[in-house]
Amino acid sequence: MHIVYFAPIAFGYLKQRPQYLAEQLARVHTVYYIEPTVSFASSLRHKELDVRQSVQRRSKRLYVIRLDGKLSLPYRLKYADKLYWSAISEYIQILRKIKQIDLVWVGYPGWYGVAQYFSGVRVVYDLMDDYVRLAGDQKTRAYLQRACGKLEKTADIILTTSVVFYEKLKRKRKHVYFVPNAMPDHFRQDCEEKIRAEQPEIKKQTVFGYIGVIAEWFDNAAIEVLADIPNSRVVLAGPVRIKKIQRENVIYLGTVPKEEIPALLKSCDVCLYPFLDCPLLASVNPVKIYEYLAFQKPVIAKRCRETERFAGMASLYSDLSQLRQIAAKGARQPFADPQAYHRFAADNCWSFRGKQVLGILEAEKGKREDRK
């Protein structure tokens, strides 16, 4: 099968669900990973961006393609293009490059304008985030709202990462599946090797760590509570879009290269998921917690529907008072023994998720053939 994978991020960006699933699909099928197109307007505003097309072969069955963006519009201008005429250029480019297309995978609703032109081809919609809430401006939100609605109605298969999305769409549609995020296989292997090779060290200081974007959903008040713990240090890695906390023991590292993340996680005593109680929190399947648990790190996380699944492995808090108690007492260890860790890792790594997705595609293909 030949799959056109419309991705939300560039393949070389910080590795996340899109790249992992594309690699898993490419174990069996030929996958064309289409990176977000850089429009001419975006290229002028961000001088380092390149509008030119490119094709890279990443493995035997995985190709990474960036389309020419000279005729493309930025999302904030696409809202006025209700007939999606601006997508025709990208559609034509794909047809010229890819001779056989059996499946269209939409990893971001902004690609709906292009995906809709592939008539007669099955469409998979991978609903990973609340894209509308995450949009930066009103026109982009309106465009994505419209595109999300159309994909939810027309996609042949819908994958969801959160229970909220799954329950909402399962009431409206058939062929909706729950496929949450997972831990990187190499994180798990790296962790297992280090555990065997190293002896535990005695620390005089507790290091609380967080890796990810620090934006309006991030709870600075929770960080203040942790910074008040005697002999504590809070290390925050990731781009900062809100006001920084001015405390000597709160350290901002900025964006950390992906190859340095394992070492950073290993240096933390407790890992954090300190999000505010907002609608966005309820719809985000916390890939960070999977990554923390890959390193067998104690986790402190804000209690919500998506973190409840980790209740047996993480310390969950509902308010700052509970957080203070947990931090003072000490976060729980995530796994009772090595066997418990191995069971969790085996069922929650990207290679296992890849098998789940491949199984769904095969089952849906069989149902479709039976209906003919």
Image: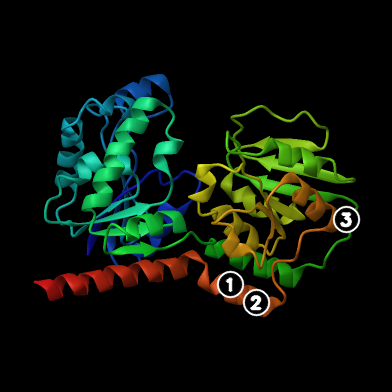
Q: 311 or 286, which is in the foreground?
A: 311
Q: Distance between the residues labelled 2 and 1?
A: 6 Å
Q: Is mark 2 on a helix, strand or loop?
A: helix
- Mark 2 residue type: Ala
Graded by Cα atoms within 10 Å as few (under 14), some (14 to 19) or many (20 or more), the crowding at tag 3 reads few
Disc nearest the viewer among 1 and 3: 1
Q: Which mark is residue 340?
A: 2
At 48% from the left and 50% from the top, the residue drawn is: 283
Q: Horizontally, is 93 left or right of 282 in the view?
A: left
Q: Confirm whether residue 66 shows in the render.
A: no
Q: In this view, does 238 lie above or below 170?
A: above
Taking 211 as reference, is 43 left or right? left
Q: Which of 121 and 58 is in front in this view?
A: 121
Residue 63 image offset from top left, x and y in percent: 31, 53
Q: Residues within 10 Å of mark 1 (few under 14, many from 20)?
A: some
Q: Residue 203 carries which label?
A: 3
